[in-house]
Amino acid sequence: MKLAAQYNRATLIITLVVLVLAGLVYYTAINYIVNKQLDRDLTEELTEIRDYVSTNQQLPKPLDFEGDQTTFTRTHETELETTFFDLPYHKNRGNKIEQGRAVRSMIILKGNNYVITVAQSKEASENLTQLIIGITVLLTAILLVILSLTNHYIFSGIWKPFYHILLQLKAFNVADKGNINLNATAIDEFKELNEAVTVMASRVKSDYQNLKTFTENASHEMLTPIAVITSKLDTLIQDEILKAEQFAQINDIYTATNKLSRLNQSLLLLVKIDNDLIQDDTTINLKDLILEKEHQLQELVQSKHIELTHQLEDKGITASKYLIEILINNLFNNAIKHNLVGGKLHVTLTQTALTFQNSGDGEGLNGDEIFERFKKGAHSDGTGLGLTIAKNICTQYGYSLIYFLDGQYHTFKIVF
Amino acid sequence: MKLLIIEDEQGLRESIEKYFTEAGVLCESCSTLSAAIAKIAMYQYDCILLDIGLPDGEGFTLLEHLKSTGKNEGVLIISARNSLDNKVKGLNLGADDYLIKPFHLAELKARTDAIYRRKAFNTNNLLNYDLISIDLLAREVTVNTTNITLTRKEYDMLLYFIANKGKVISKNAIAEHLWGDEIDLVDSFDFIYTHIKNIRKKLMEAAQKDYIKAVYGVGYKFA
């Protein structure tokens, strides 16, 4: 639920509750005041009647007097407290019943006790109450409208910096060069939020940069020792008094060293792509590049008896030749390495896509996982970085690289 | 050929020096930029192997120095810095080639020979080894007065072998020379076998002599 909606709902409920309570309090208070007023009137009336009785030594006629209805009833009770109470009021002795207020008391005339009841209509005060309730309801409505308008203003105005921060955070990318760009705001909380976000973003970025620098430096530092190992091995194999099994071990060291070196180069390359350090864009004819690569790799393809076919259109792109060569190389490499002996490899280049399809065991691979670093098949002796590099190069130029199993062909497709 | 090796990593420097000396190259070496500049001022070299990251400065300084003093020694940069910028910078400053660490000594030797040959092209474009004679301009190979036809890769391979004659060259080094270091090598080893077999056969038919010898599955030796 949106903050605005949540807030609106809360204010709405609170406003309604408060106003209903206020209405009730109003009603009770007015009722109380009206009753007090009526009771005073009735007391006055009662006093007048008492005065009349004591002066004239007779009961007044039970007439409506200014709308007052007075009745006298003889009683044998000797004591009766004066009480005020509500009762239905029959206007003009007719059928119309209104709310009424009455007083009951005792009057003594010539030794006889009489209960005297004076009733008055509450009609007028009832109207007042209704008017007050009406006004309250109207006020409630106006207040609600004003509140929702205010909320609307608050959310579109005051909360603007918040939504701006949110937008920036969503777009935040640790690898980006640019810093987070926040608007100045007069509200302290948002100022604080801005500061916190800015500090966090720059810290995350510097951490990320440090990590990358570390990777780069570590990889660099490793290259020289690897170079020493390689050169020592090259020297060692010149010694022909070594035995066959020693040569076999040297061979293993060669292979391991070679892998180490390629791993390093791959990591360095990834850092460079991530840092956007390779910017030598030129116009490249992809078709020519693919044909060149096919030519370069033809012996490898032949040695595995792979049937290589292609269907290539002329397609020009603007990118770094270095990176695109690596991209094509990695995809070819992948399609040859994981191919069957006597398998097939088909390359298709159209204006919109470049597709590598190779035969292999029929099992599909996880289309998301295979592009992750160091994810590789159980039998693969590669670095596990080739496809990651390919993916990153594609991302760099806004291409998408996807994998899917098309029939029994493993398919890697670059969509330009 | 007279060679100057400028490399601060002792292990690597010694290996290179040993390898080249055994191949009949006159080698001198040093580990700092200042020592290198001093040596260049005193002697004339055919080729210089130059490391970029030196303790007392960058190898680029030496290139600038060579340029300003009008020397035209062939320079091969050997660097751990595999960046296009560095490569372009080095080549622009007059270096002849750029080799990234780690590398195989056989590759280094082949590239150094290529630079040396280019420098001496005016005088001689024929490369002779035993019965084999290669016209470097026409890229033609004659063995025992018979013209033999080699594919581009076979021709490259033959030059590579001649540059490293008498040395055992590992299969790793050969694979890297043929496909660069971007390819996974294990798959390519089978191919190297057939590839070498083809060259061997062609040379044998013409020369009646086996030049290439397999060494315990680790590599090959051309002699």
Image (tube, coloured by chain):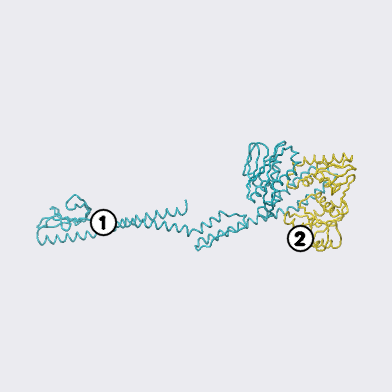
Chain colours: A cyan, B yellow
From this view, report whether residue A395 is shown above or below residue A66.
above
A317 up-or-down from A194: above or below: above
- Compared across the picture, whether B186 is left or right of A189 comes to right
Q: Mark 2 is on which residue type?
A: Glu
Q: Position of residue B123 (x, y in %)?
A: 88, 54
Of A291 and A67, which appears nearest the observer?
Answer: A291
Residue A127, label in figure = 1
Amino acid at circle 1: Asn
Specify whether disc 2 shares its chain with disc 1: no
Disc 2 crowd, CA 10 A, few/some/many (<14, 14-19, 20+): some
Residue B216, horizontal then vertical, whole percent:
82, 41
| Chain letter for the residue marked with disc 2 in the picture | B
B57 or A131, which is in the foreground?
A: A131
Residue lying furthest front in this view? A314
On the image, the x and y values in percent for residue A205 come to 61, 57
Q: Secondary structure at mark 1?
A: helix
Residue B58 circle label? 2
Q: Residues within 10 Å of mark 1 (few under 14, many from 20)?
A: few
